[in-house]
């Protein structure tokens, strides 16, 4: 069970909540602006397939939340997922901005090499829909560090 997400480049060290889907069938979101949420109906970080973690860009009256600086990640940046005393390291491979309704290829895959997708809001706020118009998706590939002691 993943407990913390650590992204040194952007200063993230966040608790991980477990989520499923909301009443509209979309992936749930964290209940706190400083937390991230792992889609627990999919692979755990380090398992085959795409582990998906989302986080808020902002929060009601707060201009910055946990993934405010996610757009500053670049290929080669490291992302660690800590589970108890173990960690799994991922290395960023791509970043992309997509419409909020899009499902990029590979997102939520249940098979294949271990991968991690980090998602947050992007673009402008759509008052009519009550959401941001786009999503930032950062994809990272898993490294062989499972079982090593967490920092």
Image (cartoon, rainbow, N blue to C red):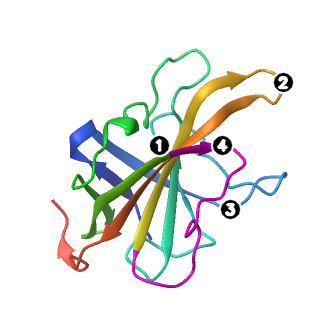
Position in image of residue 56 (x %, y %): 53, 36
Image quadrant occupied by the C terminus: bottom left
Q: Which residue is mark 4?
A: 99
Which residue is drawn at the image coordinates 68% and 62% (left, top)?
Answer: 20
Q: How many residues crowd mark 4 within 10 Å: few (<14), some (14–19), many (20+)? A: some
* Above or below, 55 relative to 44: above
Q: Is residue 127 left or right of residue 15?
A: right
Dot placed on the residue nearer the N-terminal end, 3 or 1 = 3
Position in image of residue 133 (x %, y %): 68, 33
Image quadrant occupied by the N terminus: bottom left
Q: Which residues are magenta?
A: 97-114
Q: Main secondary structure of the magenta part?
A: loop
Q: Which residue is mark 3?
A: 20
Q: Are marks 1 and 4 in contact (CB under 8 Å)?
A: no
* Above or below, 1 relative to 78: below
Nearest the eye: 140 or 63: 140
Dot placed on the residue nearer the N-terminal end, 1 or 4 = 1
- The quarter holding residue 76 reads bottom left
Query: Which is more foreground, mark 2 or mark 3?
Result: 2
Nearest the eye: 58 or 132: 132
Q: Is residue 109 magenta?
A: yes
Dot placed on the residue nearer the N-terminal end, 2 or 3 = 3
Residues at marks 3 and 1, CA–CA distance in whole angstroms: 15 Å
Q: Is residue 24 left or right of residue 56?
A: right
Judging from the image, what secondary structure is the residue with disc 1 in? loop
Q: Are marks 3 and 1 in contact (CB under 8 Å)?
A: no
Residues at marks 2 and 1, CA–CA distance in whole angstroms: 27 Å
- The quarter holding residue 113 reads bottom left
Q: Is residue 41 magenta?
A: no
Residues at marks 1 and 4, CA–CA distance in whole angstroms: 23 Å
Query: Which is more foreground, mark 1 or mark 4?
Result: 4
Q: Which mark is residue 140?
A: none
């Amino acid at each position: 069970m993943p407990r913390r997400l650590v992204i040194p480049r952007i200063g993230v060290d966040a608790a991980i909540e477990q989520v499923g889907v909301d009443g509209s069938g979309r992936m749930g979101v964290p209940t706190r602006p400083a937390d991230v949420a792992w889609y627990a109906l999919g692979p755990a970080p380090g398992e085959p397939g795409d582990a998906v973690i989302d986080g808020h860009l902002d929060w009601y009256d707060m201009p910055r939340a946990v993934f405010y600086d996610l757009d500053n990640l670049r290929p080669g940046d490291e992302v660690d997922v800590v589970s108890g005393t173990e960690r799994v390291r991922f290395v960023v491979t791509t970043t992309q901005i997509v419409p909020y309704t899009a499902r990029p290829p590979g997102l939520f895959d249940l098979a294949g090499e271990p991968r991690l997708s980090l998602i947050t809001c992007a673009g402008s706020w759509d008052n009519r829909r009550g959401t941001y118009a786009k999503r930032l998706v950062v994809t990272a590939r898993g490294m062989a560090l499972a079982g090593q002691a967490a920092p």
